[in-house]
């Protein structure tokens, strides 16, 4: 693998594994290399007994702009599913450190984490409807669990983002920090988690996740079925082409 193909990098910080998205030229868009890198990093976090917590970080201006529309996100992985993380059952906590944009699949990466530290310059959104798609990485059913129902519907139906301050007021963001401080504060939160008994943390996380998410198999099936219906529409082709042409799409409802 060449250095250009390494889209996710890891750093050990005591018992914390920092997992950093590293495709700045593509705004950390999720392609096959990102999927492979996230899967490998999260497998390491799960399998290494010396690691007790993870921090997922993006770039200073863009956390992740979503799936790569040109390349696609690659194939789901055996242990993590879409992007190597979206349907993963993680035994160890993962903290998102968000600076800048977390849109589409990038927001869904955040929703796949357990805690969120965000810069005041961060924003979260689902722009998929602007392209003829839906948030098929779990966002359609996870957003209504962590946000008020009307806010989740607003984001899903308008495609408009919310800023970090509103996200913190609504309970999505655990810590709201000044720009540039998200990673350091997320590391501090992870260190506080690591100060506790690791087995007790894992049991607590598992029970909380079972209560929050339950069995998502029916949700995933419904999401995949809805995506399949959209993939054959003229509107999807128009939405994607308009994105690359940098123009407004002309919807036909078919």
Image (tube, rainbow, N blue to C red):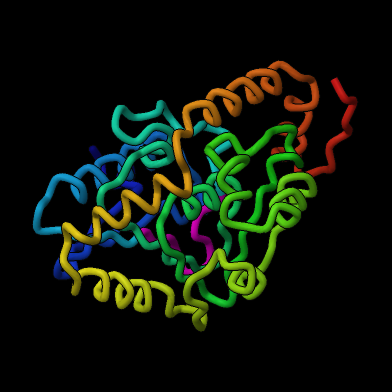
Q: Where residue 49 sits in the image (x, y, percent)?
A: 10, 53
Residue at 49% of width from left, 81% of height from top? 177
Q: Residue furthest bottom?
A: 178
**Figure check: 106 above or below 13:** above
What is the quadrant of the N terminus in the image? top left
Q: Is residue 162 magenta?
A: no
**Figure check: 67 above or below 220:** below
Q: Quadrant of residue 88?
A: top left
Q: How many marks on residues?
A: 0
Q: Where residue 23 sits in the image (x, y, percent)?
A: 42, 51
Q: Residue furthest top?
A: 232
Q: Is residue 252 left or right of residue 118?
A: right
Q: Where residue 140 sits in the image (x, y, percent)?
A: 62, 40
169 and 224: which is toward the camera: 169
Q: Where residue 142 sits in the image (x, y, percent)?
A: 56, 45
What is the quadrant of the C terminus in the image? top right
Residue at 24% of width from left, 74% of height from top? 191
Residue at 88% of width from left, 31% of height from top? 251
Q: Is residue 25 left or right of residue 139?
A: left
Residue at 43% of width from left, 60% of height from top? 58
254 and 1: which is toward the camera: 254
Q: Quadrant of residue 161?
A: bottom right
What segment is highlighted magenta in the picture?
56-65
Q: Is residue 64 magenta?
A: yes
**Figure check: 233 above or below 44:** above
Q: Is residue 76 left or right of residue 142?
A: left
Q: Quadrant of residue 187?
A: bottom left
């Amino acid at each position: 693998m060449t250095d250009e193909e390494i889209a996710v990098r890891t750093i050990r910080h005591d018992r914390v594994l920092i997992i950093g998205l590293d495709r700045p030229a593509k705004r950390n868009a999720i392609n096959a290399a990102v999927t492979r890198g996230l899967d490998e990093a999260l497998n390491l976090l799960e399998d290494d007994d010396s690691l007790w917590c993870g921090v997922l970080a993006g770039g200073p201006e863009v956390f992740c702009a979503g799936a790569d529309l040109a390349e696609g996100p690659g194939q789901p992985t055996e242990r993590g599913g879409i992007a190597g993380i979206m349907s993963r059952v993680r035994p160890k906590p993962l903290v998102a450190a968000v600076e800048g944009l977390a849109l589409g699949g990038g927001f869904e990466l955040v929703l796949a984490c357990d805690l969120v530290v965000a810069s005041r310059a961060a924003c979260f959104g689902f722009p998929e409807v602007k392209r003829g798609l839906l948030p098929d990485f779990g966002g359609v059913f996870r957003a209504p669990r962590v946000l008020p129902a009307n806010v989740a519907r607003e984001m899903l139906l308008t495609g408009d983002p919310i800023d970090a301050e509103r996200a913190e007021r609504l309970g999505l963001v655990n810590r709201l920090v000044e720009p540039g401080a998200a990673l350091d504060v997320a590391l501090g939160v992870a260190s506080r988690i690591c100060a506790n008994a690791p087995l007790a943390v894992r049991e607590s996380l598992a029970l909380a996740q079972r209560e929050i998410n339950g069995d998502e198999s029916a949700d995933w099936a419904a999401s995949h079925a809805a995506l399949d219906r959209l993939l054959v529409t003229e509107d999807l082709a128009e939405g994607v082409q308009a994105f690359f042409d940098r123009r407004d799409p002309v919807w036909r409802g078919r």
